[in-house]
Amino acid sequence: MQLSRLVELAAALRATSKKTEKIALLADLLKETRERETELAALYLTGALPQGRIGIGWRTIEAALSGDGPSHNPLTLKEVDEAFSQISAERGSGSAGRRGSHLRALFQRAGRDEQPFLADLLIGEMRHGALEGVLLEGIARAADLSPSAVRQAMMFSGNIGAVARIALEEGEPGLARFGLRLFFPIAPMLANSAEEVGEALARLKRAAFEFKLDGARIQLHKGEEEVKIFTRQLQEVTGRLPEVVEWARALPIREVILEGEAIALHPNGSAAALSNHHAAVWEN
C-alpha cells in the first residue's frame, strides 16, 4: 500500500465528524492491506511507530523539510517503515547527522501532502479523528468480528498493529491467543470523568468518596524474584523505580500483577503530592 492512500484517508477522517463514517472509512482501508501493511496502517493511524521513539526532534524535521522538493517516486508503507528502522538504528558519534540525512532522503521521496503526515507521525501529533477506540471498531468491521473481542485483545496486547493483523488474518481464534501473561503489560482501564460530583452521583446513584493522590500510574509484574514495571503507555521503567522493585520482591506472593499509583513519600511517611481539588468517586 502506498503512503498516499493513508494520507488520503486521514483527510477523509478529518472531513467528517460522524463516527459511523469514520469506522467505515477505516474498515475499507484495512481490507486493502496485507500482512505487515495491516500492522503499519493501524499503528500510523494512531500516531505510533513500531520502532517507538527514534530520536527525531522538530529541528531535525525542519532541516529535512528544507531540502530539495519531492520526487515522483511514490512511497509505500513498508518503505517508510524501513526508513524509520534505519534512522532508529543509528548510534554513536555522528549519529544525529546520519539520522538527519536518512530523514531528508525520506522527505525528498514523499509528496507535498505526505510530508506533513510524516512530520506529525514522528512527533506524535496525529490529528485526524482516528482515535484508538474508533480504529478498534474499524478493525472489528473489517474482520467481521465483534468490537468487544477486538477490544479485549487490545487490552491484553497493547499493540494495535498486531491486533489488526491477527484479526484480519486469523479472526476470533487468533485473537483468543491474547490473554493475561506475566511480564506482558496490559492496557490500563481508564475511568470516565465527570464535570462535578452531582453528575457522578446521577450516574452511579450510590458512591463512596476518597482523596485522589497524584502519582505516576504503574503496572507491576512479579514472578518469583523477577520484577518488571511498566507505565500506562506500556513502556518498561523497572530500572527507574528501585524502591518499588525492592518492595515487590519482599511481598509474600509468588506471582502477581498489580496496578496503581507510585507516590513519593516524605521522610515522615506522608505523601509528597496530594491533589487538593480532586476526589475519586467509586460505585459502591
Image (spheres, rainbow, N blue to C red):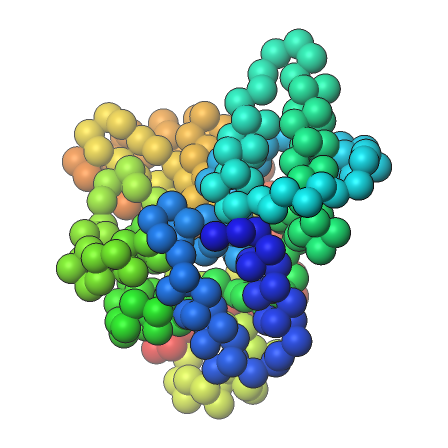
Q: Residue at x 22, y 33 (%)?
A: 223
Total labels drawn = 0
Specify whether 163 is left or right of 241. left
Specify whether 34 is left or right of 131. left
271 vs 93: above or below? below
Viewer-closest of 196 and 26? 26
Q: Position of residue 256 (x, y in %)?
A: 23, 43
Viewer-closest of 88 and 229? 88
Q: Position of residue 44 (x, y in %)?
A: 53, 51
Tell me the quarter of the picture where residue 206 sits: bottom left
Q: Which residue lies most toward the right here?
A: 66
Q: Position of residue 245 (x, y in %)?
A: 37, 30
Q: Residue at x 38, y 45 (%)?
A: 36
Res. 115 visible in picture: yes
Specify whether 62 is left or right of 132. right
Res. 213 visible in picture: no
Q: Residue at x 51, y 80 (%)?
A: 21
Q: Residue at x 25, y 56 (%)?
A: 169
Tell me the quarter of the picture where residue 28 sits: bottom left
Q: Quadrant of the C terminus?
A: bottom left
Q: Which residue lies most toward the front here?
A: 72
